[in-house]
Image (cartoon, rainbow, N blue to C red):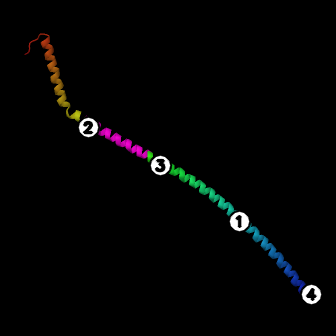
Amino acid sequence: VMEMIEKLVHEAAELRDDSRKGEAAAQAAYEQLIADTNASVEALQREVVVQTEARTDAQKDKREAENDHTETVKELEGLAKYNADLHEQCDFFMKNFEVRQNGRQAEIEALQQAKQILNGAALS
């Protein structure tokens, strides 16, 4: 009977030691899990900050690009209008070139006749 009691005491002591070792291992695993989780949370929070800054910069760049695009479109519209105006003027000059050439030629001939008259030549 004593032997059984001693055996039970010995088994209880072993069971208690195993439980303590298991508890210590579980506690260490839990602490490691908490440390890993905290490190992961901190890394993710830093990543959120970095991503937020990158998003803000991207939005700023987008606004600047949109403003540049708007200004460029306005400038192109102005240049297109200027081109159309120039084209209209050139068309007018090209259309009336012959008429103006004939008028200038008649004016030159009239001036030459006036010069001859002033020099004393008779008109024919």
Residue 12 position within the rendered picture, expressed as x and y whole percent measured from the top left:
85, 81
- The quarter in which the C terminus is drawn is top left
Q: Is residue 5 above or below residue 44?
A: below
Q: Verify whether residue 85 appears in magenta.
A: yes
* Residue linked to disc 4: 2
Q: Label 3 belongs to which residue?
A: 63
Mark 4 residue type: Met
- Which label's residue is closer to the chain start, 1 or 2? 1
Q: Position of residue 21 (x, y in %)?
A: 80, 72
* Residue plotted at (82% across, 79% down): 15
82 or 112, nearer to the observer: 82
| Highlighted range, magenta | 68-89
Q: CA distance from mark 1 to mark 2?
A: 79 Å
Label for residue 88?
2
Q: Are marks 2 and 4 in contact (CB under 8 Å)?
A: no
* Image-based side of 16 in relation to 46, left or right: right
Badge 4 element: helix
Dot 3 or dot 4, earlier in sequence: 4
Amino acid type, callout 3:
Arg
Inter-mark Cα distance, 3 to 1: 43 Å
Label 1 sits on residue: 34
Q: What is the spatial separation of the Cα atoms under label 4 and label 1, in whole angstroms? A: 47 Å
